[in-house]
Amino acid sequence: MIVDDEPDVLLSVAQILDANNYRTIKARDGQECLHKLKTESPDILLLDIMMPGLTTKEILREIEKDSRLSGMKILFLTAVHLQEAEEEDLFAFKQVVGLIGKPFSVRELLDSIEKAIQR
C-alpha cells in the first residue's frame, strides 16, 4: 500500500511497482489508509511522513492495534530531514523497517522494498 498526499508521487510509485509485478493499493491520506486496511492486508506500507490530517504516530498506533497487520512492514517516504529524536520515536514501532528519502531513484525504491520483504 502506498500512502501519499502528493498525487504525482502516489501515481509514479504505483506505476513503478505495478511495472515490477507488485500489486498496489493507493491511499491519499492516513484516514483513507486506515479505512482500506480494514479490508486489505498488504505486505508493505509505504507511508509518507508529512501529510495533512492524522499524524504518522496516530496511523502507526492504529496499525499496531490490528493483529491482522502484525506482519506488515512499514517504510517511510519523506522529503524532510527528521531530527534524531523524531526518527527514534517513529522507529520504535516494531513494524517500521526503513526510510526512503524523496526524491528517490527507481532502484533505491525497489531495493528498499526487497530488503523489507526479506526482513
Image (cartoon, rainbow, N blue to C red):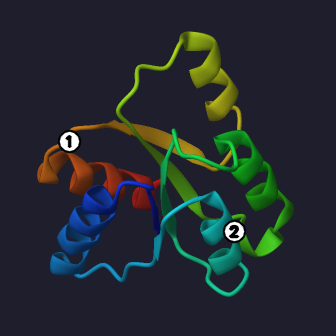
Q: Return the residue at label 1.
A: 104
Does 115 appear above or below 19?
A: above
- Residue 54 in the image: x percent, y percent? 70, 49
Q: Kindly identify which numbered label has been placed on residue 61.
A: none
Taking the view exactly as shown, the residue that stands out farthest to the right is 65
Expressed as whole percent of the image width and height from the top left, the position of residue 2 reads 43, 64
Question: For this rendering, which residue is in front, 2 or 97?
Answer: 2
Q: What element does badge 1 sit on?
A: loop
**Horizontal side, residue 76 vs residue 8: left or right:** right
Q: Is residue 9 above or below residue 92?
A: below
Residue 60 placement, left or right of 5: right
As shown in the figure, which amino acid type bears the numbered disc 1? Phe
Tell whether 119 sits left or right of 109. Answer: right
Q: Secondary structure at mark 2?
A: helix
Mark 1 or mark 2: which comes first in sequence? 2
Observer-nearest of 117 and 88: 88
Residue at image position (61%, 68%) is 33
Q: Residue at x 52, y 71 (%)?
A: 43
**Residue receiving disc 2:** 34
Q: Could you say where residue 1 lies in the image, as x and y percent from the top left?
A: 47, 70
Q: Give the crowd class for mark 1: few <14, some 14-19, many >=20 residues within 10 Å.
A: few
| Tags 1 and 2 touching, CB below 8 Å | no
Residue, x 51% and y 39% (percent of image)?
A: 50
Q: Residue furthest bottom?
A: 39
Residue type at numbered disc 2: Leu
Please state the horizontal and vertical placement of residue 24, each as a whole percent of the image: 38, 78
Residue drawn at 57 percent across, 23 percent down: 87
The count of marks equals 2
How far is disc 1 from disc 2 in space, using C-alphas?
A: 25 Å
